[in-house]
Image (cartoon, rainbow, N blue to C red):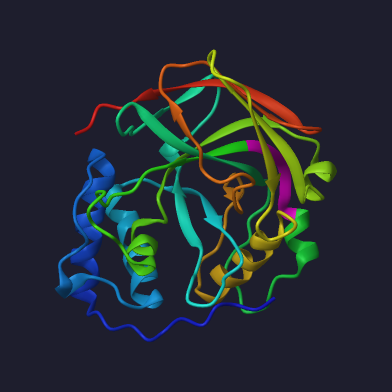
Amino acid sequence: MSTSTLAPALLTPDAIQNAARFLAMRRLRGRQGPVLPEACRPHTLDDAFAIQQAMVPLTGWPVGGWKCALPSEGKLVVAPLYAPSIQSGDGAQVWARDGQVRIEPELAFVLGLDLPARSQPYTEKEVDAAIVRTHLALELIDSRYDAAAEPTFEDKLADGLVNQGLFLGPELPAEAARQAAAFEVRLQVGNAPLQVLAGSHPDGLPRKGLYWLAEFLRAKGIGMKAGQVVITGSYAGAPWVPLDTPMNVRYEGLGHATLSLKARAAG
């Protein structure tokens, strides 16, 4: 399993901390703003990842999981999911924009074993053995940049790749989910017409990103822990849905969830 090569850092440690403070404050309060000041704005993937990681202790929240995907030229798709933002049951609280929020239909892999940082690479078989459950999941989307900001990919990576949380739905059949390269996503929101979306995984099979993540984090000296949740890419884009409206999401042949999203109060 290969890892992504990051460009050399350009920012000083102080600049990375300043950037992390800006973005952590926005995340905690549900606020948006312009891109970061040039003195602490990331222009390399390495700086962006460093800012993202520096945010974790500033939020005061533990890491409850990760979002990831296979890397591509000039892009590194990896970001922490904060434990308090992972919600389940009959719905989730979200930062909303004009009474709506974007959701990404995904699969979530729950770890039952630690995958600690170590010198020896992880095999796919070891990663498979660490997965204890697979769930229907909806990534909850929001940016800490406002509509006029025009952030670069590095800006977005520093911010956590537009993640604001995760709705963890019901458990799905493990082997069927493991092989789920494609399935219909049927989205019924209130009394609106049924949306039938042709879902397909951007990396082909949904565990590919997790295999890459285990090796990337290992090389960075970062481990994963039992209980953490990993999502690896949307099957059907990021549709907007309204708040306070009953919603049913069905992954054809796998399972479904019924939920409603409610607004958090901005700080």
- Left or right of 48: which side holds 199? right
What residue do we see at 30% from left, 30% from top? 98
Q: Nearer the viewer, residue 83 or 190?
A: 190
Which residue corresponds to the image point at 75% horizontal and 34% vertical from the top-left? 172
Image point 41% across, 37% down: which residue? 84
Residue 130 position (above or below residue 151): above
Q: Where residue 63 sits: x, y (%)? A: 45, 50
Above or below residue 249? Residue 179 is: below
Tag count in the figure?
A: 0
Picture layout, residue 117 above or below residue 73: above
In x, y percent, where is residue 9? 33, 83
- Based on the picture, tell me whether residue 186 belongs to the magenta stretch: no
Residue 262 location in percent, x, y? 39, 22
Instruction: Give the percent coordinates (x, y) of residue 71.
Output: 57, 70
Residue drawn where x is 73% and y is 59% of the image: 204
* Position of the N terminus by quadrant: bottom right
Q: Nearer the viewer, residue 202 or 78?
A: 202
Magenta residues, start to end: 130-136
Which quarter of the image is occupied by the C terminus?
top left
Residue 135 is inside the magenta segment: yes
Q: Furthest residue to the top?
A: 191
Kindly indicate the quadrant of the structure image that contains residue 212.
bottom right
For the view shown, which residue lies furthest in the front direction?
A: 193
Comparing 222 with 76, the one in front is 76
Main SS, magenta residues = strand
Q: Would you identify the image quadrant in which residue 223 lies?
A: bottom right
Answer left or right for 124 relative to 78: right
